[in-house]
Image (spheres, grey):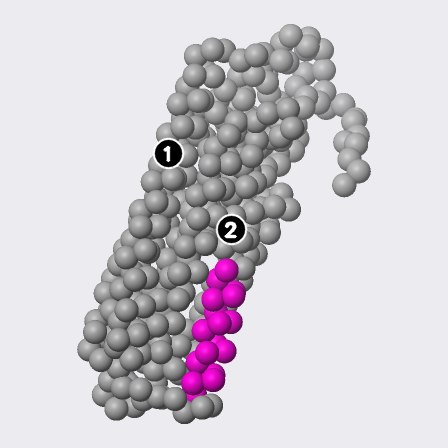
Amino acid sequence: MGDPEQLKEASVDRHERFGNAGRVIKIGFWVNAGLMIMKLLAGYFGRSEAVFADGMESAADFIALGSSMIALRIGSRPFDEAHPYGHGKAESISAVIVSLIIFSTGGWILVRSVHAIIDRVYEVPAVMAVAAAFLTILIKEALYRYSITAGKKLGSPAILAVARDHRKDAITSVSTLIGVTGAFFGIAVMDPLAAGITSLFIFHIGYETFMGAAHELMDGKPDDNSLEEMRKLAEGVAGVEHVHEIRCRRSGQYLIVDLKLDMAAEMTVRESHAIATAVKKLIFDQFPNVGDVMIHVNPHEEEHQDLIRL
């Protein structure tokens, strides 16, 4: 059992973190709803294949955002007997689902645009289609910047995946705008051609999202400088002779850290436990995104063998 005040603070911090994350995704969800309706109507009545495809892409985003909202709800649950390391991996699973939706959307747009070019089914778009593409770029880029800032601050795989999805939409709409503008001024083939080129950007973003989520699900090392900072922090605690090893993996918005500390061989269990607790508390205080720190104590300057079967 931990200190009641510390447990209360941890509960408040968890509630605040996941509350902020949920707010970011909900804003994207409802803004995306408005954009979807606008683009579908503008694409249909404005006779633009690229803008209509953009609207269908926004419809697919509903599934992605919905899965992210569910993942955050699951990931916000504290650890239990069945999940002693918490439920944070739900966010990485959600990111995989988002990446598959991105891939599917790219494939759908590519096939549709290729058919339009082969069948020579070209139409001259209306002004509303051009306006819809331009407005989407501005809104989606703003959503991307808002989401990526929040995602990096919280260290949330789900929000970072959603942010990349917003950037994907912004890039898609740039290509859409070029194509629909060219078609509006008489080069009709540019509309479906722009949709096809856009699908290649979409595939790339889907690949990056999938690889990032897969890396986290396989307990890959987080891509930041936190480990070295934690090492220096631990070695600055009196009684810690050396950090023998430090490892880290991500579980949703939190990091789980494994530390092996070298201490004087003659130290008592009580003394080494007190030092290890001080190290853990210091890391918690300096790194709000650390969920747990597991510490193993080694005798300093004595031969010892690390047993591992991985």
Helix or strand or loop: what does disc 2 sit on? helix
The quarter of the picture where residue 45 lies is bottom left
User: Percent position (x, y) of residue 268?
Assistant: 68, 8
From where the camera sits, is residue 242 visible?
no
* Stretch of the chain drawn in magenta: 101-117
Q: Does 135 sit left or right of 5 as displayed?
A: left
Residue 34 higher or lower than 299, as above or below:
below
Give the mark, 2 or 1, whose residue is nearer the N terminus: 1
| Residue 186 horizontal side relative to residue 148, left or right | left
Image position of 251 (left or right of 37): right
39 w.r.t. 219: above or below: below
Question: Is residue 192 part of the magenta span, yes or no?
Answer: no
The residue tagged with tag 1: helix, strand or loop? helix
Please, what is the dominant secondary structure of the magenta stretch?
A: helix
Q: Which mark is residue 95?
A: 2
Q: Position of residue 18 (x, y in %)?
A: 41, 34
| Other residues around mark 1 within 10 Å, as few (<14) / some (14–19) / many (≥20) | some
Who's the residue at 34% across and 40% down the image? 23
Q: Residue at x 65, y 28 (%)?
A: 82
Q: Which numbered tag is attached to residue 61?
A: none
Up the image or down, 278 lies above or below 292; here it is above
Q: Position of residue 288 (x, y in %)?
A: 44, 30
Q: Which residue is mark 1?
A: 19
Q: Position of residue 286 (x, y in %)?
A: 44, 27
Instruction: Identify which amino acid the numbered label 2 is placed on.
Output: Ala
- Of residue 102 and residue 238, the one placed in the foreground of this image is 102
Q: Does the image show residue 218?
A: yes
Left or right, 103 with respect to 14, comes to: right
- Under mark 1, the amino acid is Gly
| Residue 221 image-quadrant placement | top right
